[in-house]
Image: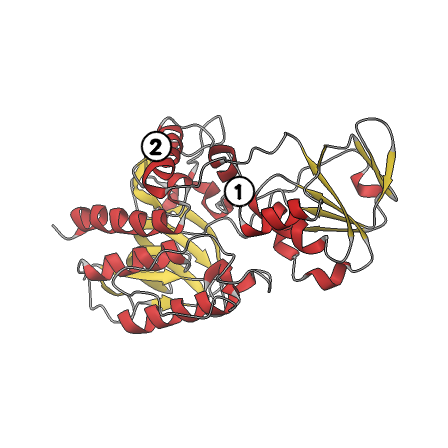
Amino acid sequence: METEFTHRATVVVIGGGQAGLSAGYHLAHRGFANAFEAPGDTPSYVVLDAEEAPGGAWRHRWESLTMATVNNIFDLPSYPRPTVELATPSKVAIPEYFAQFEAHHQLAIQRPVTVHSVEYLNHNPEEGFRIATTNGTWQAKAIVNATGTWNNPTLPYYPGQETFLGKQMHTKDYVSLEAFAGQRVGIIGGGISAVQQLEEISRVATVHWFTRREPVFRKEQFELETTGREVIAKVTAAVEAGKPTGSVVSYTGLGWTPYARAAKKRGVLNRKPMFTRITPTGVIEEDGTETPLDVLLWATGFKPAIRHLEPLGLQNELGAIQLKGTKVVKDPRIHLVGYGPTQSTVGANRAGRIAGSQLKKMFLT
């Protein structure tokens, strides 16, 4: 028999970033009540957020990522973003906007609450869900997972990595360029963050940029209505076929952003093939020469943070979760938002709307 539950809700949304807030808004807008106020068996929802305050992963972005340099941020539902100075750090402006949105719509959010695991009640897929958290145990009839990727950085292994005597860090740990002044820095990765950090750090340090493949810069400007839709279609096809998806850049290529142009103009946008191994004081490059380094910065991206869902057995033999829309094919009571084709901010909004509409049909009609 299951132990006594601390809380109950019809739908538990896990994650309070843009996708989670969108899902919470659409559930409330479609008639789900606040789980802390709903009487009896009234269909209800709650958003569980691991962060200390509103903002999701934006709270942890590096200081120099301002509203002028950040990628497109789309408004949350029915609440346009206020105008802010372009020089405002995104880690300040976006959390403030999220907080205003939450307060305006009076969303049912509890934080900080970390979800440790989601299991089937009595280990029976025919029953509901048991959600173990840092603030008690929840029972739910459906799950909307909106945990994003920030807490699951990708850290590839290369021979000799454990012998390196310098500092190793991931994009997730990056704060500002000042920490690298006068050092020799190896930046690994071919994505947007790698180029941003390359441009910044190269102002105060000697940098070496390593990627597995030659970076591809788009000749044309990225257009949401054309290129964006094509990318979404490709990623959607992959997740609906139950296949793993690649990084965003693998679909879009790199854009000639102001920081990419600045790096090229200063002659630091020089990619090297991946090194073959790591030594205590640097790396052995493809041609056999050793390059001394003080820091290895792994700008190698992120993967979905879904370890807490592992007890449900949703992943297939390829390690992917097959979706139809936002619904998990193996269990349509589970929705993944901000996942696969809905990782962008506009996609997160759309996914929250789809999940809210589907769950209304399941529990309110």
* Residue 335 visible: yes
Q: Secondary structure at mark 2?
A: helix
Give the side of residue 42 with respect to residue 83, left or right: left
Observer-nearest residue: 48 or 23?
23
Q: Position of residue 57 (x, y in %)?
A: 50, 58
Residue that mark 1 sits on? 303
Q: Are marks 2 and 1 in contact (CB under 8 Å)?
A: no
Q: How many marks?
A: 2
> Residue 77 is drawn in which quadrant?
bottom left
Observer-nearest residue: 285 or 320?
285
User: Which residue is pictured at 19% across the width and 46% down the height?
Assistant: 362
The numbered mark at residue 95 is none
- Neighbour class for label 2 at 10 Å: few (<14), some, many (≥20)? few
Q: In the figure, 242 relative to 326: above or below?
A: above
Residue that mark 2 sits on? 233
Q: Residue furthest left?
A: 365
Give the side of residue 348 with respect to residue 169, left or right: left
Cα separation between marks 2 and 1: 20 Å
Q: Position of residue 40 (x, y in %)?
A: 20, 65
Q: Secondary structure at mark 1?
A: loop
Nearest to N terminus: mark 2 or mark 1: 2
Q: Which kind of residue does numbered mark 1 sit on?
A: Lys
User: Which residue is pictured at 52% across the width and 57% down the height?
Assistant: 69
Which of labels 2 and 1 is toward the front?
2
Observer-nearest residue: 129 or 319?
319
User: Which residue is pictured at 45% across the width and 44% down the height?
Assistant: 309
* Residue 32 visible: no
Q: Residue furthest front?
A: 265
Observer-nearest residue: 47 or 61?
61
Q: Position of residue 311 (x, y in %)?
A: 46, 42
Q: Which kind of residue does numbered mark 2 sit on?
A: Ala
